[in-house]
């Protein structure tokens, strides 16, 4: 399989380290000069990039940047260039009061397209392919991010965006789509719909399925491969650092190659902040090395993974991150959207002035992930009359949907029935891969 930028993706480790050092030096100087947030943080620890940064390890002295920091800088405070140089703005979903807003210069967009072209090439995409992108085209980075990378390769792009599954299938069939870009659960939704209309995936021209946007398992990969007759690869992107294009698997399917000439990746112990060695599981921390408009220094992704540094058979010399299966904070990722349970509590509290006892529960309905919010019934909060209960449940569902962008199912459960952890209620329970048990639900 061709490598998109072979001279960069197969750079010797020594050359790569030198490139990282030079780019990091330039980035630190720039944020110190242009972003008051970083200047303040660096001054607090008496760190002057020009004098105090001589080795990559020096970065371990610098404080972390969090999603909260970015939300508080809403909308443009952390931009490192004037708005007139910004040609595109994206934002991550509203997981706290303010979304996290990021910007891109013309050069950033150019780099982004190449980085996405690298991960798509690694996943098998070539100029002759017809690539169907079912990610949303909007403020989230998924759709447009993949789009321009696919165009850079010269593939024929079908920007079908989200939803309307039967139309997606008809397009796949009629336009002879060879590459499908989707969330893993949507690949299974498509497979299910094809079963129900009696269409075999063998009748399609599909070769590859490129998945991202939500935590998923090796078992799901094998299921998608078996049902759609494709090879499936995983890739990783977060808006705060770029969007798609940060890391992606090659066809050897052994972890996602990090674009290390553009990102410095560290894995830390989420509690102590200590940097961990290769193979050790911890929180992924990313520093951008070339971003102009929105550089981030030591951004805590909240994603738990490990880094593999053994050589890969594909010839790329970059290290690889393992599949992201869990997070180290309370953020729940559903359909690519970050949700903080505390904020859901705030919304529920606004409705009737009382904060109910509740829990976010992720379940699988067929192939789809469904977010449920289980609320314990109290006399103050709910009345006996069925119709009034229904109205309240609908109101809760609508208010939350307005805030997070997806509609949760509200379930009323008996007092004391939510899963406890020590003294407290677990804010989130993932039941997708559990056997279904009796939940004592009184409503759904
Ligand atoms: Zn590889």
Image (cartoon, rainbow, N blue to C red):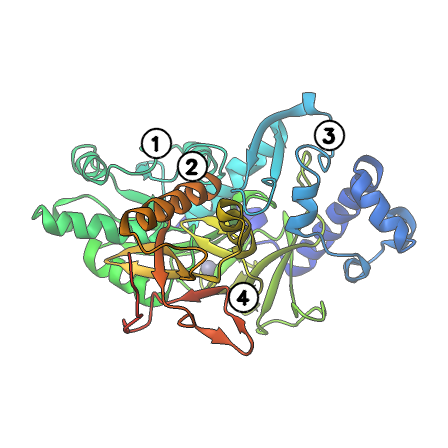
206 displayed left or right of 8 = left
Mark 3: few, some, or many residues within 10 Å (few <14, many ≥20)? Answer: many
Mark 3 and ligand 1: say if the CB distance to the nearest ligand atom is below 8 Å: no
- On the question of residue 246 being in view, the answer is no
Of the image marks 4 and 2, the number of the one nearer the N terminus: 2
Q: Residue at x 45, y 38 (%)?
A: 402
Whether residue 272 is situated above or below residue 22 in the rendered picture: below
Q: Which mark is residue 159?
A: 1
Mark 2: few, some, or many residues within 10 Å (few <14, many ≥20)? Answer: many
Of the image marks 1 and 2, the number of the one nearer the N terminus: 2
Q: Position of residue 212 (x, y in %)?
A: 41, 51
Q: Position of residue 223 (x, y in %)?
A: 25, 62
> Of all residues shown, which one is farthest toward the top?
84
Quadrant of the rendered structure where residue 305 is? Answer: bottom right
- On the question of residue 297 being in view, the answer is yes
Observer-nearest of 330 and 388: 388
33 displayed left or right of 172 = right
Of the image marks 1 and 3, the number of the one nearer the N terminus: 3
Q: Which residue is mark 4?
A: 305
At mark 4, the secondary structure is strand
- What separation in Å lies between label 4 and label 3 (alpha carbons)? 32 Å
Q: Which mark is residue 143?
A: 2
Q: Position of residue 126 (x, y in %)?
A: 36, 41
Of the image marks 1 and 4, the number of the one nearer the N terminus: 1
Q: Which residue is mark 3?
A: 81
- What separation in Å lies between label 1 and label 3 (alpha carbons)? 30 Å
Observer-nearest of 284 and 350: 350
- What separation in Å lies between label 1 and label 2 (alpha carbons)? 8 Å
At mark 3, the secondary structure is loop
């Amino acid at each position: 399989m061709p490598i998109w930028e072979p001279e960069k993706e197969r750079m010797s480790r020594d050359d790569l380290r030198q490139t990282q050092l030079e780019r990091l030096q330039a980035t630190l100087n720039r944020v110190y000069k242009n972003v008051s947030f970083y200047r303040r943080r660096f001054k607090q620890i008496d760190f002057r990039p020009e004098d105090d940064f001589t080795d990559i390890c020096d970065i371990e002295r610098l404080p972390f940047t969090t999603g909260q920091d970015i939300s508080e800088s809403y909308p443009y405070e952390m931009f490192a260039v004037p708005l007139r140089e910004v040609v595109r703005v994206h934002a991550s979903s509203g997981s706290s009061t303010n979304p996290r807003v990021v910007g891109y210069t013309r050069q950033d967009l150019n780099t982004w397209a190449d980085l996405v072209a690298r991960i798509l090439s690694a996943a098998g995409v070539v100029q002759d392919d017809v690539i169907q992108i079912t990610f949303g085209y909007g403020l989230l980075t998924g759709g447009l991010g993949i789009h321009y990378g696919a165009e850079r390769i010269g593939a024929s792009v079908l920007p079908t965006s989200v939803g309307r599954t039967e139309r997606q299938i008809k397009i796949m069939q009629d336009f002879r789509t060879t590459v499908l870009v989707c969330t893993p659960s949507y690949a299974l939704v498509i497979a299910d719909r094809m079963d129900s209309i009696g269409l075999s995936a063998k009748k399609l021209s599909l070769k590859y399925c490129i998945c991202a946007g939500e935590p998923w398992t090796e078992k799901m990969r094998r299921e998608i491969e078996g049902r759609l007759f494709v090879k499936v690869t995983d890739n990783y992107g977060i808006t705060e650092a770029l969007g798609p294009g940060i890391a992606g698997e090659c066809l050897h399917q052994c972890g996602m190659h990090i674009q290390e000439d553009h990102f410095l990746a560290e894995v830390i112990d989420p509690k102590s902040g200590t940097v961990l060695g290769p193979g050790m599981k911890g929180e992924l921390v990313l520093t951008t090395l070339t971003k102009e408009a929105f550089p981030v220094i030591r951004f805590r992704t909240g994603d738990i993974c490990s880094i593999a540094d053994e050589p890969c058979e594909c010839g790329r010399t970059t290290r690889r991150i393992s599949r992201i299966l869990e997070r180290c904070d309370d953020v729940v990722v559903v359909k690519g959207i970050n949700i903080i349970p505390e904020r859901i509590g705030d919304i529920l509290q606004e409705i009737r002035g009382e904060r109910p006892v509740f829990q976010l529960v992720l379940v699988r309905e067929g192939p789809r992930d469904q977010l449920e919010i289980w609320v314990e019934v109290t006399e103050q909060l709910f009345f006996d009359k069925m119709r009034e209960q229904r109205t309240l449940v609908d109101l809760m569902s609508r208010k939350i949907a307005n805030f997070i962008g997806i509609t949760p199912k509200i379930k009323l459960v008996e007092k004391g029935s939510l899963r406890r952890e020590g003294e407290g209620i677990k804010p989130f329970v993932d039941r997708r891969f559990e056997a279904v048990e009796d939940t004592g639900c009184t409503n759904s």
